[in-house]
Amino acid sequence: MAEKIKVLISEEEVDARIRELGEKISKEYEGKQIHLICVLKGGVFFMCELAKRITVPVSMDFMCVGSYGDGTKSSGVVRLAKDLDESIENKEVLIVEDIIDSGNTLYYLMDVLRQRKPASLRLCTLLDKPDRRVKDVHVDWTGFEIPDEFVVGYGLDYAQKYRNLPYIGVVEVAE
Ligand code: HPA
Ligand code: MG
């Protein structure tokens, strides 16, 4: 079984959009420090690029929230695989995600983080698949809305492969 990757959003388009998001976010948080929370593993590529385009002071932490299963379908069961290292109390927290589809993971995560009393809690995602939404999560900044297709690259994997692609692609499986 061979897989082919078709480019959906080019490297140039992704880079340009991240620059725009960086500018918007920097304006919104003027005079403040942003505490970026990366949702591992997928969010790490986007967070690094976004952080480079933010002009206000930034600190960072990482967490890993997964659902069981490793193919193209998630089981819907959320588990906290790695918690943050630092407290977020009174911090201006911005969660950075690679993709939001059902919203199940983010709904759970935001609920957990809200209980830790951050000064603010907002969400930035590189990709959004609104057609897949099950839980109502408010997204503050979105890179691209995409159709309900399985995508890889820029942190997103297919069975742990393709995270390192510098563009967003669609997996085409040929028998
Ligand atoms: N690709 C990779 N991982 C994902 C996707 C996707 O399209 N949707 C949710 N997790
Ligand atoms: Mg993710």
Image (cartoon, rainbow, N blue to C red):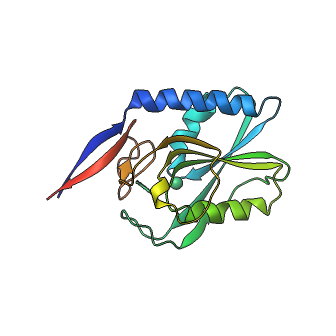
Instruction: State the quadrant of the C terminus.
Output: bottom left
Instruction: State the quadrant of the N terminus.
Output: bottom left
Identity of the residue furthest to the right in this view = 90
Identity of the residue furthest to the left in this view = 175
Identity of the residue furthest to the front in this view = 131
Where residue 6 appears, as percent x and y from the top left, is 27, 42
Q: Is residue 55 left or right of residue 64?
A: right
> In front: 120, or 164?
120
Where residue 152 appears, as percent x and y from the top left, is 37, 48
Whereabouts is ligand 1, in terms of quadrant?
Answer: bottom left
Q: Quadrant of residue 79?
A: bottom right
> In front: 129, or 6?
129
User: Vertical placement of 113 versus 9: above or below?
Assistant: below
Where residue 68 appears, as percent x and y from the top left, is 47, 71
The residue depicted at 35 percent of the width and 53 percent of the height is: 149
Residue 108 seen in render: yes
User: Vertical placement of 43 versus 113: above or below?
Assistant: above
The residue depicted at 86 percent of the width and 49 percent of the height is: 90
Residue 82 seen in render: no
